[in-house]
């Protein structure tokens, strides 16, 4: 094969990794009782009932809108009211009761099958009812992201009732791509159906202005749960294709690694994570490991990539890349060090950090790689400070926020500094002869051997879940013990 073939295969792998949509959507036809909603306050005289089917009258919808509070949203660490950025009504979950049960009607099954990779279709997910929102004429919500509440939360589910409305489309954006969920168009002429959209928590979304009518939604927080088998629900009309592309990624990797002109002597391939994850704002525990259990909570294409490498008999590893291009295999708590004069020196000397030398995908003039941007003092780290280096060939560049640690910076005057990291996946790829043997062994496995491996993997995953259960329960207990006002300030208002 020629180098141009290797280039086309590498390009195919990059495109396959970014092809998976970070959302799923559809419609579901239901019995009339599922559209019944009771709402009000402690004062019984204000309690009301409404049927949120397409036949809901304007007067009843107006009363529901009047019963809502003005919707706030998260800005940094504050919860603010700004109707130039968000204009909508909201009602907290404790102020209403809905007959709709998203698990009983099979909606959570649809979200699992449509949003999560194939390997997680046996993993139950849990939906926590969060808010009711009413968007009347002229209401909108400018671009924003939802904040994950704990490591187990991975996304949001928005259910739209078939109340008459125009406009109010939900626009989703992620890494330069854009999709439109137009509930008004999807529900036109469907009196006893609802529309739904589920998306990962790091997806930016925007509610476009409502032209007329009332757009009424329920929003749920989505959490990972236990494992169980799922089957599709017959009544669901899925609008977004279910495209679990594990096999496509594995095929693209296999074709690339089988090319003898691609990295014939081997090397380290790097992949930036495509999604963000719920790491603590700062690292305060020297024994805390950000990689523990991360493989179980990977989203979308990140999960597909990790699974594809392990299926090919190779070992993907999580690593941290510091803002000064030092690679670490664990998180460092700088707060325990006292005053720090040179963070880089400490990372290289005390924690076996490696100076990163980057090669990034080029694709121009037939070249696979080009020199990556280098931190200006990188040569000093490797030379004067004496750090070892690691050359990484980045298929997709590292991006997104990882854990950080604060520290006391030493200088003329002590000051508070922050050590920032990004999480990535690195894979040590052997030379062409050795890796072809590995690929041959994997492709020659019988169906029974693959089934046994799947069962072993499932057992390992269940063991992992048990190990993390106490950690997550502790997080949830802490959340429950927070005061209601403090909890509201910590949340971002959703659609």
Image: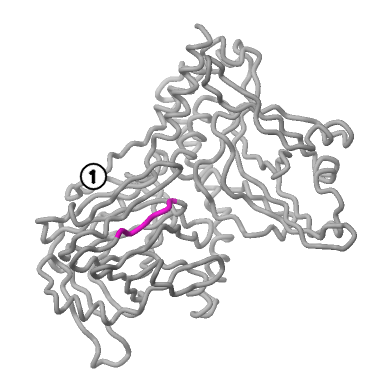
Q: Give the residue drawn at x 33%, y 52%.
A: 171
Q: Give the residue drawn at x 27%, y 45%.
A: 231
Q: What stretch is highlighted in magenta?
A: 203-208
SS majority, magenta: strand
Q: Give the residue drawn at x 57%, y 71%.
A: 478
171 is higher (above) or lower (below) than 345: below
In the rendered view, does 427 fall on the left or right side of 350?
A: left
Q: Give the residue drawn at x 62%, y 26%.
A: 393
In the rendered view, does 360 fall on the left or right side of 119?
A: right
Q: Where residue 429 appears, x then y in whole percent?
A: 61, 22
Q: Quadrant of the C terminus?
A: bottom left
425 is higher (above) or lower (below) than 152: above
392 is higher (above) or lower (below) than 409: above
Q: Residues within 10 Å of mark 1 (few under 14, many from 20)?
A: some
Q: Where residue 303 appears, x then y in whole percent?
A: 48, 39
Q: Does the magenta stretch include residue 188?
A: no
492 or 92, which lies in front?
492
Q: Where residue 111 appears, x then y in whole percent?
A: 32, 50
For the view shown, which residue lies furthest in the top direction?
1
In the rendered view, does 41 fall on the left or right side of 390?
A: left
Q: Label 1's element?
A: loop
Tell me which colouring the rendered structure shows: one colour
Q: Number of labelled discs?
A: 1
374 or 152, which lies in front?
374
Q: Where residue 267 appears, x then y in whole percent?
A: 65, 22
Give the quarter of the image for residue 133: bottom left
Q: Name the residue under label 1.
A: 239
393 is higher (above) or lower (below) than 211: above
């Amino acid at each position: 094969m020629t180098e141009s073939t290797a280039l086309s295969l590498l390009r195919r792998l990059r495109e396959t990794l970014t092809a998976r949509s970070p959302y799923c959507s559809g419609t579901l036809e239901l019995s009339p009782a599922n559209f019944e909603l009771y709402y009000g306050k402690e004062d019984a005289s204000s309690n009301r009932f409404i049927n949120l089917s397409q036949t809901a009258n304007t007067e009843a919808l107006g009363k529901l809108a009047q019963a809502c509070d003005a919707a706030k949203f998260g800005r940094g660490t504050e919860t603010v009211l700004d109707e130039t950025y968000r204009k909508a009504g909201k009602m907290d979950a404790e102020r209403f009761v809905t007959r709709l049960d998203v698990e009983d009607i099979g909606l959570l099954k649809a979200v699992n099958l449509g949003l999560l990779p194939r390997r997680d279709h046996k993993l139950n997910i849990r939906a926590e009812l969060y808010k009711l929102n009413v968007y009347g004429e002229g209401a909108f919500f400018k671009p924003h992201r939802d904040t994950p509440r704990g490591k187990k939360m991975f996304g949001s589910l928005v259910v739209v009732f078939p109340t008459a409305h125009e406009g109010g489309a939900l626009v989703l954006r992620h890494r330069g791509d854009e999709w439109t969920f137009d509930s008004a168009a999807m529900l036109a002429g469907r009196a006893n159906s609802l529309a739904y959209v589920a998306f990962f928590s790091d997806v930016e979304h925007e509610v476009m202005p409502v032209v007329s009518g009332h757009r009424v939604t329920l929003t749920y927080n989505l959490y990972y749960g236990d494992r169980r088998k799922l089957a599709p629900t017959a009544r669901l009309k899925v609008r977004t294709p279910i495209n679990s592309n594990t096999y496509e990624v594995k095929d693209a990797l296999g074709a690339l690694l089988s090319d003898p002109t691609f990295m014939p002597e081997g090397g380290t391939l790097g992949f930036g994570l495509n999604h963000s994850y719920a790491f603590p704002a700062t690292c305060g525990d020297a024994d805390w490991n950000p990689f523990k259990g991360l493989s179980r909570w990977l989203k979308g294409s990140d999960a597909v990539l990790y699974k594809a490498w392990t299926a090919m008999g190779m070992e993907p590893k999580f690593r941290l890349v510091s803002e000064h291009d030092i690679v670490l295999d664990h998180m460092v708590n700088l707060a325990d060090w006292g005053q720090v004069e040179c963070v880089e020196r400490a990372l290289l000397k005390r924690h076996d950090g490696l100076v990163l030398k980057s090669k990034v995908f080029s694709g121009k003039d037939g070249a696979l790689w080009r020199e990556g941007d280098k931190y200006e003092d990188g040569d000093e780290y490797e030379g004067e400070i004496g750090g070892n280096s690691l050359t990484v060939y980045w298929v997709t560049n590292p991006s997104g926020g990882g854990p950080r640690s604060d520290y006391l910076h030493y200088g003329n005057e002590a000051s508070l500094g922050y050590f920032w990291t990004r999480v990535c996946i690195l894979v040590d790829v052997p030379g062409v002869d050795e890796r072809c043997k590995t690929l041959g062994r994997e492709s020659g496995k019988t169906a029974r051997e693959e089934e046994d491996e799947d069962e072993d993997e499932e057992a390992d995953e269940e063991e992992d879940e048990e190990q993390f259960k106490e950690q997550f329960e502790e997080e949830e207990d802490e959340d429950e013990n927070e005061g209601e006002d403090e909890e509201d300030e910590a949340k971002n208002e959703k659609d």
